[in-house]
Amino acid sequence: MRVDQKLSKNSFEKKYAKITLFSYRMPSHLFDKLLVQIGRACTPLYGANQGKLLVIVDVLDANRVLVQGQDIPRQVVSTGDIQLVDAVAKITNKSTTEEVAKALSSSDMQNALLNTSGVKKALKQQKRKSLNDFDRVKVQILKKKKNALLREKLNALVQKSGSEVVKKLAAKNAPLKQ
């Protein structure tokens, strides 16, 4: 195209449509994710310290961070070996060990750790391991009662519904009609 030739508005939009659609703002879905940052609480996924609360003290590079815990000295950990927690302590990369320990002891950090899925799962497994035979039988009976109630409600919905698709699905699932 020559310099003296003018582009009409319509031809300009067609030519640069892909460029003009691009937004320089940060996508909103990134705000929902937990980001690796100084002060972010985390917990190790493996090892002797699994399930303990740590805080990221410094980000070394894209794959490594410096972390510290209550009774865990500062150490370098891979970002793949930690689970981020939805809590951020107000510390800097120049914070002393005492400042980090004080930030870790706050109730917000402890509550955030207890709300993670990994800790909930570990507590549930620990509770299951501590059951004796009698408790396991009680759990089994309660589970049977719950499933029977669900089965009754589902069968009532199937009978109430006149849909042929629902009836075919109910016929395939023979145990549901007990």
Image (cartoon, rainbow, N blue to C red):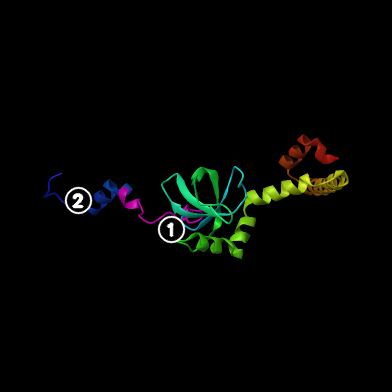
Instruction: Tell me if 53 is positioned left or right of 93 in this view.
Output: right
Residue 9, horizontal then vertical, whole percent? 24, 54
Instruction: Tell me if 13 is positioned left or right of 27 in this view.
Output: left
Query: In the displayed image of the protein, which residue is found farthest to the right?
Result: 134
Above or below 173: residue 120? below
Q: Residue at x 21, y 52 (%)?
A: 8
**Which numbered disc covers residue 7?**
2
Q: Quadrant of the N terminus?
A: top left
- Mark 1 vs mark 2: which is more N-terminal? 2
Residue 165, horizontal then vertical, whole percent? 71, 40
Residue 115 in view, yes or no: no
Main SS, magenta residues: loop
Magenta range is 19-36
Q: Quadrant of the C terminus?
A: top right
> As rendered, which of 36 and 162 lies closer to the eye?
36
Residue 31, horizontal then vertical, whole percent? 48, 56
Instruction: Tell me if 158 is positioned left or right of 64 in this view.
Output: right
**Which numbered disc covers residue 93?**
1
Residue 87 in view, yes or no: yes
Mark 2: secondary structure: loop
Above or below 103: residue 51? above
Q: Residue at x 61, y 52 (%)?
A: 52
86 part of magenta stretch: no
> As rendered, which of 113 and 75 lies closer to the eye?
75
Q: Residue at x 36, y 54 (%)?
A: 23
**Which numbered disc covers residue 160?**
none
Please state which of the two labelled residues, at mark 1 or mark 2, is closer to the viewer: 1
Tags 1 and 2 in contact by the CB under 8 Å rule? no
Residue 75, horizontal then vertical, whole percent? 50, 48
In whole angstroms, how far apart are the C-alphas of marks 1 and 2? 53 Å
Q: Residue at x 76, y 35 (%)?
A: 172
30 part of magenta stretch: yes
